[in-house]
Amino acid sequence: MTETQTRELARPPFWRDIRVLRIVGQVLAVLVVFLVGRWLFSNLIDNLNRVNISTSFDFLSGPTNFQIPFCGECWVIPFQSRFNPRSPVWEMTVVGIKNTFLAGFFGVILASVVGVIVGISRLSENWLVARLATLYVEIFRNIPPLVIIIFFGFAVFTFGPFPILAESWELKVPGTDDNFLMINNDRWGIPGVSQVGEALVFFIVLLVVLIVAILIWRWRTRVFEQIGEPHHRVLWFIGVVVVGLVVAYLVSGAPFAMSWPELTENRRNISGGFQMNWGFMALTVALGLYTASHIGEIIRGSILAVDHGQSEAANALALNAFQRYRFVVLPQSMRIAVPPTINQYLNLVKNTSLGTAVSYAEITALTKTSIGNGRPAVQSIIIMMAVYLSFSLIISLILNIINRRIQLVAR
C-alpha cells in the first residue's frame, strides 16, 4: 500500500473532520445571526408602520422647536452659524456632539493630570502625602459617578458657596475695567474671542501651520534617534504654532478681537467672553476626578512593575526624584499603563451621557428631549449610538497607535 493510500485511509469522513465541522459551525452561526436580525428588523418596520411612524431620517431637516439650555445663539459651526429653535434637528445633533466632545476632552485632560499625580503620591515616602492620595482613591473610586456628578452639580455649584448671578465675583485685569474672571453659581466667564471679519484665510493658514509643526516634530524626533541630540520637539512645536497664529492673524486681516465677560445691564446674564455653565463644570470635574482615582491605581501598579534596578541606576547617576520619574521610571511605566488607561478614557466619554442629571446639553440629553418633542425614537437612538461608537473607535485608534509607538522593539 502506497503512502498516499495510507493517508487517505487514515483521514476521517467529512462529517467527522474537525476542520469541516469548524467551517460548517461558523457558517451556521452567521446564518442564525443574520436570520434573527432580519426577523427583528422586519418586526420593527411592521410595528412602526402599524402606528404610522416614519422610518426615514427626513426629520433631521425639520426644525428643532426647542431651545438648548445655556445655548442662546450658540455656535454650530465655529464662527459660521448659530443655533436657535428654528434650526434643523441635524444642527441640534452637531451641538450635542460638540458638547459631548468638550466634556470628554477636558475630562480626559483632568483625569490624566490628577491620575498621574495621585499614582505617584500613593508611592511617596511622605506619610501624609501617601495617606491623602489613598483617601482620595478610596473615596472617589467607591462612589457611583452619577452621585459625584449630582454632588458637584447641586452641592457645589447650584446651592454651594458661589454667589448668585447678579452678585458675581469679578476679577479685573490689572489696570483696566475688563473682567478676567467672573464666578457665580450658574456659570463662569473667562476671556474669549469674537469674530469681526472673514476668517476663512485664517483657518487655511492655521491648517498649513499645524502641518508644518507636525513635520518639524517628526524631524526633531529623527534627529534625536540618529545622533542623540536633544530634540526639544515640544518647544519647537509650540514655537511654530505660536508664530503661525500671529502670522495667520496678520495675513487674514485681524478677523478676531478679544471679548471680555461682563454682566448685562439687568444683571441677569453674562455677555461676551467664553462662558462655562454649571452643568458642564459639574460633569467635567466629577468625571475627571472619578476617572483619576482609577488611573491613579493604574499608574501606581505600572510604576511598581518597573524593575527596582532602574531606580537604583538613576540614583547612581545622581538624578533627583523628579528627574528619576521624568526620565527613567515614568517612560517605562507608561508602556504598561497605556492599555488599561484606554478603557478608562472610553468609560469617561461614555459616562458623559450622565450629564442629563445636571441639565448639560450633551448628545443623550438632547436626543431624549428631541424624542419627547415627537421625533422618531428609533432613528434618533441609532444616531446617538453611532456617535458614541465613533468616539470610542477614534479614541481606541489614537491610543493604540500611541501604545504601539512606545512599546519596545526587538532588535
Image (cartoon, rainbow, N blue to C red):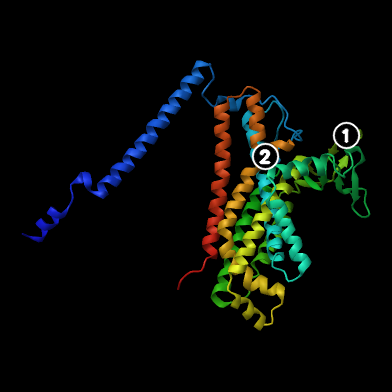
Please say whether residue 186 is visible from this viewpoint.
no
Residue 281's image quarter? top right
The one of 383 and 151 positioned closer to us in this rendering: 151
Residue 294 visible, this orientation: yes
Q: Residues within 10 Å of mark 1 (few under 14, many from 20)?
A: few
Give the residue number, with chain letter if any, for mark 2: 354
Residue shown at 53% from the left, 56% from the top: 400
Above or below, comparing residue 53 to residue 310 in the picture: above
Q: Give neighbour class at mark 2: few <14, some 14-19, many 20+ (Cα, 10 Å).
A: some
Looking at the image, residue 161 sits to the left or right of residue 371; the answer is right
Disc 2 from disc 1: Cα separation: 28 Å
User: Residue 255, position in %: x, y?
Assistant: 75, 46
Figure disc tally = 2
Q: Where does the N terminus fall, quadrant-wise? A: bottom left
Point out residue 163 in the picture as x, y percentages from the top left corner.
89, 42
Q: Which mark is residue 268?
A: 1
| Residue 99 sits in quarter | top right
Q: Nearer the viewer, mark 2 or mark 1?
A: 2
Q: Assign a secondary structure to mark 1.
A: loop
**Quadrant for the C terminus in the image:** bottom left
User: In this view of the protein, which residue sits in the foreground, 169 or 31?
Assistant: 31
Q: Quadrant of residue 315?
A: bottom right
Give percent across and percent down for residue 203.
66, 48
Q: Type of residue at label 2?
A: Leu
As drawn, the label of residue 8 is none
> Callout 1, which amino acid?
Arg
Is residue 15 found left or right of 233 in the rendered image?
A: left
Q: Residue at x 61, y 51 (%)?
A: 345
- What residue is at 58 percent from the left and 39 percent from the top? 387
Percent x, y for residue 120?
A: 69, 65
